[in-house]
Image: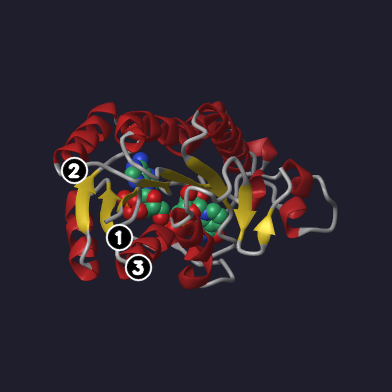
Amino acid sequence: MTTTLITGANKGLGYETARRLVAAGHTVYLGSRDPERGRRAAAELGARTVALDVTDDASVAAAAEAVAADGGLDVLVNNAGIEGRTDDNAVVGAAGTTAELVRTVFETNVLGLVRVTHAFLPLLQRSPAPVVVNVSSGLASLTRVTTPGTPTHAYPGVAYPASKTAVNMITVQYAKAFPGMRINAVEPGYTATDLNGRTGTQTVAEGAEIIVRMAQVGPDGPTGGFYDVHGPLPW
Ligand SMILES: NC(=O)c1ccc[n+]([C@@H]2O[C@H](COP(=O)([O-])OP(=O)(O)OC[C@H]3O[C@@H](n4cnc5c(N)ncnc54)[C@H](OP(=O)(O)O)[C@@H]3O)[C@@H](O)[C@H]2O)c1
């Protein structure tokens, strides 16, 4: 039996990933910073739930203790993330980017991912087939962002792409440090969720596909890579 934790799974891509992994037979912990929203979502899916705010040391430590007490963890999906748009759903460009905005976005997308990974490492190391999926973005790709004529090149934001480039570097370094684990970064594609005011062009079913696939990778599968549904992506 494979036990899987997905952070930020009360809605969006995390929720859809939870749904699909429950269907695939995983015991799924649906992480949610709001316990009530987590309980509701878990009840809909037949999943377990654990209160987990990735920006909060005590919350993450308590979640790791709860999952450990129930028997451990095989798969960690670091999915929780924010884009840092304005209240009217505008992407903040370079001129409007403040240190405070970058701090807020990095606090969730980068420090949160490291905090959760660090807390659950001892459990993953006890698994016979540990897997980590870091939900990155195509906007993390320096190659794509610097290729004129692409939608990625046209994206004006600073904090969010920089945070996901950091996620990619963290993925590579962890994968080298833990060769017994399968640790990959994935790009779901532009998906209609609350993150982007539902402007994305894909459904959550399409977006979750690569997350679900990488969560099920076997011990001989890839590690230290960056993938979308079509295959490896340029860094
Ligand atoms: N949608 C896209 O086009 C797209 C493209 C590429 C990558 N991604 C990535 O996909 C992941 C999921 O995003 P989504 O599109 O599904 O967005 P979403 O619907 O807004 O879901 C984001 C999830 O993260 C949670 N979250 C935010 N801050 C948190 C915190 N401090 N602690 C715990 N959970 C927190 C949210 O919880 P609340 O409900 O409490 O806010 C929510 O459950 C993100 O990492 C995002 O960067 C999305």
Disc 1 residue crowd, few under 14, some 14–19, many 20+, Cα 10 Å: many
Q: Quadrant of the N terminus?
A: bottom left
Label 1 belongs to which residue?
26
The quarter holding residue 19 reads bottom left
Q: Residue at x 50, y 43 (%)?
A: 182
Q: Looking at the picture, does residue 228 appear above or below residue 198?
A: above
In the rendering, at what x and y percent does residue 172 appear? 59, 34
Q: Looking at the picture, does residue 107 appear above or below residue 43?
A: above
**Distance Cα–Cα, label 1 vs label 3:** 6 Å
Type of amino acid under label 1:
His
Type of amino acid under label 2:
Gly
Left-right relation of 220 to 62: right
**As rendered, which of 147 and 49 lies closer to the eye?**
49
Label 2 belongs to which residue?
71
In the rendering, at what x and y percent does residue 86 appear? 51, 49
**Residue 88 visible in the picture:** no
Q: Residue at x 61, y 63 (%)?
A: 229
- Do tag 1 and tag 3 residues touch (Cβ < 8 Å)? yes
Q: Residue at x 43, y 61 (%)?
A: 13
Chain-order first, disc 2 or disc 1: 1
Q: Residue at x 57, y 30 (%)?
A: 176
Label 3 belongs to which residue?
24
The quarter holding residue 60 reads top left
Q: Quadrant of the C terminus?
A: top right
In the rendering, at what x and y percent does residue 110 appear? 49, 34
Q: Secondary structure at mark 1?
A: loop
**As rendered, which of 203 and 2 lies closer to the eye?**
2
Type of amino acid under label 3:
Ala
**As rendered, which of 144 and 90 lies closer to the eye?**
144
Chain-order first, disc 2 or disc 3: 3
Q: Secondary structure at mark 3?
A: loop
